[in-house]
Image: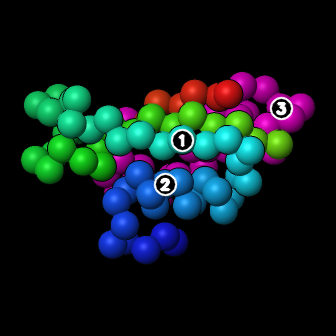
């Protein structure tokens, strides 16, 4: 597991790098834009993430299977309160 002292976006970046060996990866914390929405917290961080990712592991599999790989890699973050995850396959 990634060190918890890092911002969640960096923990997610590290996890996806480790598990999916991306050729391109960007993780953006969009939580502040969702203040007051369901799942938001008082800090304005760590609840709504956008991931843009390309990986050679995606070759030959469907879009749904690619999304499943990302969700599977991040399941423990979801279990710990990550409320929304937008995935852009690039």
Q: Quadrant of residue 62?
A: top right
Mark 3 vs 1, N-terminal side:
1
Q: Residue at x 49, y 70 (%)?
A: 2
Q: CA distance from mark 2 to mark 3?
A: 22 Å
Q: Are marks 3 and 1 in contact (CB under 8 Å)?
A: no
- The residue that label 2 is drawn on is 12
Q: CA distance from mark 1 to mark 2?
A: 10 Å
- The residue that label 1 is drawn on is 26
Highlighted range, magenta? 57-84
Above or below residue 67? Residue 80 is: below
Would you say residue 61 sits in the magenta stretch?
yes
Q: Main secondary structure of the magenta part?
A: helix
Left or right of residue 13, residue 61 in this image: right
Q: Residue at x 53, y 54 (%)?
A: 13
Measured from the top left, where is residue 72 in percent x and y? Answer: 60, 49
Measured from the top left, where is residue 50 in percent x and y? Answer: 45, 35
The kind of secondary structure element at disc 3 is loop
Picture disc at residue 42:
none
- The residue that label 3 is drawn on is 61
Residue, far right: 60
Question: Of discs 3 and 1, which sits in the foreground?
Answer: 1
Q: Residues within 10 Å of mark 2 (few under 14, many from 20)?
A: many
Left or right of residue 51, residue 67 in this image: right
Measured from the top left, where is residue 59 in percent x and y? Answer: 86, 35
Above or below residue 30? Residue 11 is: below
């Amino acid at each position: 597991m990634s060190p918890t002292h890092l911002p969640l976006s960096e923990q997610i970046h590290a996890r996806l790098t480790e598990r999916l060996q991306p050729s391109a990866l960007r993780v953006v914390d969009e939580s502040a834009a969702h203040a007051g929405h369901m799942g938001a917290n008082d800090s304005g961080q760590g609840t709504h993430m956008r991931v843009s990712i390309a990986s050679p592991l995606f070759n030959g599999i469907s879009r749904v299977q690619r999304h499943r790989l990302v969700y599977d890699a991040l399941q423990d973050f979801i279990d710990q309160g990550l409320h929304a995850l937008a995935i852009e396959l690039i």
